[in-house]
Amino acid sequence: TTSSFVETVKETVFGEGPKLVRAVDDLDMTLEQNQVQGVIGESGCGKTTLLRTVMGLYDPTGGDIRFQGQSTSEFGKADWKEFRRKVQIVFQDPFNSLDPKFSVRRTIAEPLEIHDIDYDRSDIEEMLEKVGLTPASQYIQQFPNQLSGGEKQRVAIARALVTDPEVILADEPSSMLDVSTQAEILNLLNGLTSEFGVSMIYISHDLSTVSYICDEINVMYLGRIVEKAETRELLSDPKHPYTKALIQSIPIPDPHHDRERATIGGEPGDPIDMPEGCRFKTRCPERMDVCDHTPRDVDPDGEGERSVACHLYYDHEATTGDAEEPVE
Ligand code: SF4
């Protein structure tokens, strides 16, 4: 059976009148079993709203979120409870996501109790060993203030995995840790998703971490997916000007490398007053006349092999001539 986790958020709107913010718009995403999908974008692009909407914390103002074939809008109380067991989240900030009054044992036992799953101390210890907190007997009675940031994030991952979920939603789980701890947490998540057979949506502003852990990447700009592709393809052959700019801005560790780290020029558009036409036009080095008034959806008719929300990719006539022909 394919555990696909389909979501189509048409738009998620906050506030009223002049403060109307379209945080996520026209978004179509499908997560397959054992797949790790990344969502990359700058802060404010809507990726956290996306995760919260998937979790059912925000209601989409249009569209639908489907889990294993069923729309969450049709969920009753029991469906939501089962959904909350099967879909777990790991937050960005391990310093605030653990209750300081809860021991490690109680932190990990809590979701088991909520979901009426039988357990004993050895189950908790086994989970701690799996996330690399060894010897488990040393950690099980500790409290968050006795743990490092990396150890706290390992506890949060153990808490997410202990209910045997099918999907993990990871909200920049390594971004607040130092670089070497970040690598450990990424390696841990990588290994555990394979071992537990869970799918994951991993959101981040950092393309290098997303590339490391994800099979497929969705590039998000001002509430919209502007390009999605298999990771290797996206990195080696980016199509959207925003994706190209993100790749150029990845820092290069070699001090002798002569390429300057590029930054993305211009100001991001205002989500309260969304620009007409292409939302990236205020920063795009390849902007054309057509971009000013006409937005381009991500491959609405399946015209191309790739999903790119940019006129350059589809409309050869409109380009200066050095862009590629649309792929048939
Ligand atoms: Fe740039 Fe136009 Fe493509 Fe938007 S549609 S990214 S402005 S070339």
Image (spheres, helix red, strand yellow):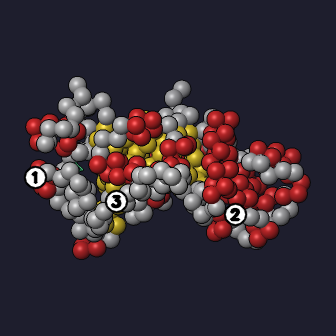
Position of 318 with respect to 99 (left or right) is: left
Q: Position of residue 261 (x, y in %)?
A: 42, 57
Mark sitting on residue 264: 3
Task: Give the mark nearest the N terminus, 1 or 3.
Answer: 3
Q: Position of residue 14 (x, y in %)?
A: 34, 67
Kindly identify the amino acid type of the residue bearing the numbered disc 3: Ile
Q: State yes or no: discs 1 and 3 in contact (Cβ < 8 Å).
A: no
Kindly identify the amino acid type of the residue bearing the numbered disc 2: Gly
Task: Give the mark nearest the N terminus, 1 or 2.
Answer: 2
The structure residue drawn at horizontal position 89% and vertical position 54%, both measured from the top left corner, is 137
Q: Nearer the viewer, residue 23 or 268?
A: 268
Q: Which residue is mark 1?
A: 289
Secondary structure found at label 3:
loop
Secondary structure found at label 1:
helix
Task: Give the mark nearest the N terminus, 2 or 3.
Answer: 2
The quadrant in which the C terminus is found is top left
State whether residue 30 appears in this view: no
The quadrant in which the N terminus is found is top right
Instruction: Report which quarter residue 191 is drawn in.
Output: top right
Inter-mark Cα distance, 2 to 3 = 31 Å
Q: Which residue is mark 2?
A: 149
Position of 308 with respect to 121 (left or right) is: left
Q: State yes or no: discs 1 and 2 in contact (Cβ < 8 Å).
A: no
Inter-mark Cα distance, 1 to 3 = 21 Å
The structure residue drawn at horizontal position 10% and vertical position 37%, both measured from the top left corner, is 317
Disc number lying in front (2 or 3): 3
Q: Is mark 3 within 8 Å of ligand 1?
A: no
The structure residue drawn at horizontal position 30% and vertical position 41%, both measured from the top left corner, is 239
Q: Nearer the viewer, residue 256 or 121?
A: 256
Query: Dot 2 surroundings within 10 Å: few (below 14), some, or many (20 or more)?
Result: some
Kindly identify the amino acid type of the residue bearing the numbered disc 1: Asp
